[in-house]
Amino acid sequence: MNKITLTTIIVLLFGLNSKAQDLNKYDKGSFIKGKDSISYRILFPENFDPKQKYPILFFLHGRGESGKDNQKQLTHGAKQFLEDKFRKKYPAIVVFPQCGSDSYWANVNITTVNGKREFNFAKGGKPSKAMHALLGMVDDFLDKPFIDKKRVYIGGLSMGGMGTYEMLRRKPRTFAAAFAICGGDNVANVQKYKKVPLWIFHGEKDDVVPSVNSLIVANQLKVLGYEPKLTLYPEANHNSWDSAFAEPQLLPWLFSNQKK
């Protein structure tokens, strides 16, 4: 029994270390310009050649991964981009910026009414501290000669889904496509990014960010004459990102889009 226990422990420890080592393939970086400062983790394609041009994907984490450790933002989604089948089929640069605990990706006022959370998204207005730094960071990346500006993508979950919409309205001509998981936005902002191919995901049993916040965006796009991809998971709560990441067509669809 002792031998089995010891072997099990060794296997578990090796497995944990392997996962940690995998995430260490995401290099650490930071963008600092004036008062703007934001840390990020970045995964370069295998056999990266700075003389070539690569697509780039920015992924925005949720509130629970906020901080300044430049690590927690890799909690959801990061392992997917480390899979061999992704790296070989889509040689892309993947960036996970981290929002500080003192800020928020989107301008939204969250209140609780009768035990339910309500999200009041701003129409326009100045960006939050984190969003302002993120905007600068994105511009800095797009100045790099190895970035294919026709293939720039963004996605996010929860707070990051909200930040995805906000980034789209602030830079509507930048992104070739985007996906937002359990996010939301002010209906008045949708006009600004109506032409960006968008895939929206949400769990219908979400009791943290109600699915109506995604439906508002999807329905307004339809009113404006555009048909977003909308996937609702009847049994999913807030962690609908698990189901979204498991969608076999998500990445093929995302990288099939490019700006003309």
Image (cartoon, helix red, strand yellow):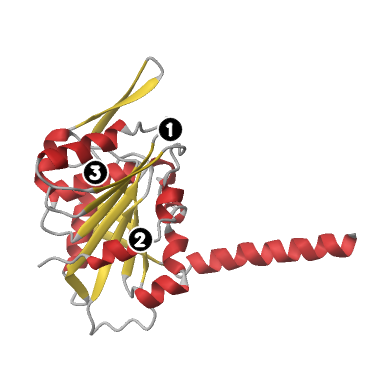
Q: Which residue is labeled 1 in the image?
A: 205
Query: In the image shown, does 161 or 145 lie closer to the viewer?
Result: 161
Query: In the image shown, does 55 or 138 lie closer to the viewer?
Result: 55
Q: Which residue is labeled 3 in the image?
A: 129
Q: Amino acid at mark 2?
A: Gln
Question: Disc number at residue 249?
Answer: 2
Task: Say if 149 sits above or below 63 in the image.
Answer: below
Residue 168 appearing in the image: yes
Q: Earlier in the sequence, mark 2 or mark 1?
A: 1
Task: Identify the residue shown where x is 18% and y is 61%.
Answer: 176
| 158 left or right, relative to 56 | right
* SS label for mark 3: helix
C-alpha distance separating marks 2 and 1: 23 Å
Task: Identify the residue shown where x is 42% and y is 48%.
Answer: 241
- Residue positioned most to the right: 1
Image quadrant containing the N terminus: bottom right
Pointers 1 and 3 in contact (CB under 8 A)?
A: no
* SS label for mark 1: loop
Residue 110's quadrant in the figure?
Answer: top left
Task: Identify the residue shown where x is 34% and y is 63%.
Answer: 251
Pointers 2 and 1 in contact (CB under 8 A)?
A: no
Q: Crowding at label 3, few (<14), some or many (≥20) Cα neighbours within 10 Å?
A: many
| 78 left or right, relative to 123 | right
